[in-house]
Image: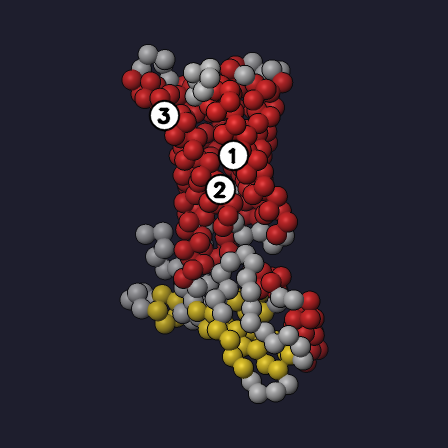
């Protein structure tokens, strides 16, 4: 239902050199992609052939978006990546809500006991969902994306180490060990730093209030627990806020157009080119600007 009326398109990149014209078909769907372009003496032109979904469900409606470096379109692999990206966020949010809700239930309730028995499972699912989203997230500056992925990797490594070396010998699950031993936040913290970076990006790019608030709630709660400067009542209040905003954040992702999570694909295409190819493209764009 969320995909009704969304467009899928085929992208064709046409490359012109001083010699005979050559045509290269290239699906540009990933953050960094390669483009088959002559290495020298070339002029680069991007021609986008789009196919959209009309009311009858047939794919014949043309949709082309104007980017900084030329027109771009959405193809089926783009749609698939965005859906997987959003699904990862939903998995992370659902797992977090399930695990965190145990803190608000009576200790003697059956639901509370069931949730506490599966806290490690929720942690693994949530971490995996976040990792999937960080793998597929579209960020123009690739170094920022790699930094978030590195934080996630450090957090996973720290979580595994904490579980195997500290929590298991103490006969506790990972989450309960971190609750009982605030210093363990140093080990699992990078995972939540990666999450904070993701919601900060979402808040900055789309002006989402819930994402902006989460950017502060997550580190404040973790630092408050780490430093023991926050009493349990404040922690529970922040935790409830985190739960509520995370649910809203993940749910609202599916109300956005697919193109929002793709960004300007012409930027990603440009970044994937070699220096000489970028120069050729910029020269062509400047010529077009002068002619217009």
Residue occupying image coordinates x 41% and y 51%: 83
**Comes first in the chain, label 3 or label 2:** 3
The residue labelled by disc 3 is: 118
Coloration of the structure image? secondary structure
What residue lies at 51% left-to-right and 75% top-to-bottom?
Answer: 24
Of 12 and 6, nearer the camera is 12
Answer with left or right where residue 76 lies relative to residue 68: left
Depth check, mark 2 against mark 1: the one in front is 1
Q: Secondary structure at mark 3?
A: loop
Instruction: Give how far across and how far down residue 218 sits, in percent.
Output: 55, 30
Residue pointed to by mark 2: 131
Q: Earlier in the sequence, mark 3 or mark 1?
A: 3
The answer to whether 268 appears left or right of 119 in the picture is right
Q: Is residue 109 above or below residue 285?
A: above
Quarter of the picture containing the C terminus is bottom right
Q: Residue at x 44, y 30 (%)?
A: 123
Residue 96 percent location from the top left of the image: 43, 31
SS at mark 2 in the image: helix
Mark linked to residue 156: 1
Mark-to-mark CA distance, 2 and 1: 9 Å
Q: Are marks 2 and 1 in contact (CB under 8 Å)?
A: yes
Q: Earlier in the sequence, mark 2 or mark 1?
A: 2
Residue in the foreground of this view, choosing between 252 and 90? 90
């Amino acid at each position: 239902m969320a995909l009704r009326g969304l467009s899928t398109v085929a992208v064709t990149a046409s490359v012109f050199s001083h010699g005979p014209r050559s045509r290269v078909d290239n699906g540009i769907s990933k953050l960094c992609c390669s483009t088959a372009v002559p290495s020298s003496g070339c002029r680069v032109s991007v021609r986008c052939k789009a196919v959209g979904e009309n009311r009858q469900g047939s794919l014949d409606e043309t949709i082309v978006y104007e980017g900084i470096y030329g027109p771009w379109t959405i193809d089926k692999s783009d749609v698939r990546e965005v859906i997987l990206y959003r699904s990862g966020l939903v998995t992370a949010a659902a797992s977090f809500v399930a695990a965190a809700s145990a803190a608000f239930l009576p200790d003697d309730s059956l639901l509370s006991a069931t949730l506490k028995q599966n806290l490690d499972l929720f942690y693994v699912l949530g971490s995996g969902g976040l990792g999937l989203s960080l793998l597929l997230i579209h960020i123009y500056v690739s170094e920022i994306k790699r930094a978030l992925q590195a934080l996630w990797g450090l957090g996973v490594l720290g979580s595994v180490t904490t579980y195997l070396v500290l929590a298991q010998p103490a006969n506790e699950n990972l989450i309960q060990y971190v609750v009982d031993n605030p210093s363990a936040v140093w080990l699992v913290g990078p995972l939540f730093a990666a999450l904070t970076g993701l919601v900060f990006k979402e808040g900055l790019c789309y002006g989402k209030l819930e994402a902006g608030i989460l950017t502060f709630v997550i580190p404040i709660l973790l630092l408050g627990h780490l430093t023991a400067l926050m009493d349990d009542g404040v922690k529970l209040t922040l935790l409830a806020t985190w739960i509520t905003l995370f649910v809203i954040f993940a749910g609202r992702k599916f109300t956005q157009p697919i193109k929002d999570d793709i960004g300007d694909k012409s930027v990603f295409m440009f970044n994937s080119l070699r220096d000489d190819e970028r120069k050729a493209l910029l020269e062509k764009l400047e010529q077009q600007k002068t002619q217009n």
